[in-house]
Amino acid sequence: MQDFLPGSRVVKTFNHMGYHDLEDGARPAGAPDRKAIAVAGETDDAMAVAAVVDALGFDPVLAGPLAAGVRFGPDTELFGANVAADELRAMLARCPDTPRGQLIAQARSTAGETNGIDSGWVKASWRGGGR
């Protein structure tokens, strides 16, 4: 995306939860049944978008750089999930050990990329990030 829009700042969010859950699921901060939305992007940009996610009634969970957005795309455990922040973090952390996560890691390894999918990265850099 950024290659097609030079100078753009891209953040991935609001794609893993169904529109009906987004429509009906907003809750005030601190509500016990508040659901979470993953946010992937460069730190400053992701933090700005996280504020929007929070204002719209969901707990933002920082997933890492934009490349980590693959953890909540189609064919992942998180895609379609409607869960609280702790469970969302657990799903993000489990992704590298899933068949889909291993396939992504293999493809990135072949391409010479590793950022955003190895399990140590999420555990070390973003555990407890967001809310």
Image (spheres, helix red, strand yellow):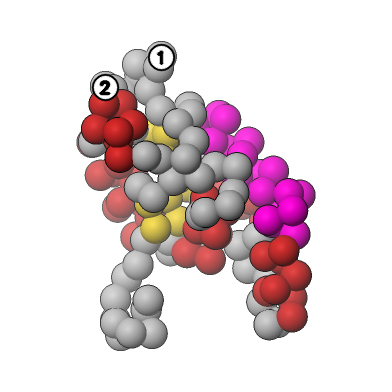
Q: Is residue 85 placed above or below 101 in the rendered structure?
A: above
Q: Residues within 10 Å of mark 1 (few under 14, many from 20)?
A: few
Q: Is residue 119 visible?
A: no
- Write the residue at 47% across / 64% down: 66
Q: CA distance from mark 2 to mark 1?
A: 9 Å
Residue 101: say if magenta.
yes
Name the amino acid, label 2. Answer: Pro
Q: Which residue is mark 1?
A: 32
- Write the residue at 61% across / 62% down: 116
Q: Is residue 116 left or right of residue 96?
A: left
Q: Secondary structure at mark 2?
A: loop
| Residue 113, position as x, y percentages in the image | 66, 77
In the picture, the disc for residue 10 is none
| Residue 92, position as x, y percentages in the image | 60, 45
- Write the residue at 74% across / 53% down: 99
Q: Residues within 10 Å of mark 2 (few under 14, many from 20)?
A: some
| Residue 61, position as x, y percentages in the image | 46, 41
Which of the two residues, 101 or 86, is positioned nearer the viewer here?
101
Name the amino acid, label 1. Answer: Pro
Q: Is residue 86 placed above or below 51 in the rendered structure?
A: above
Q: Which residues fall within the magenta stretch?
A: 85-102
Q: Which residue is mark 2?
A: 28
Question: The N terminus lies in which quarter of the figure?
Answer: bottom left
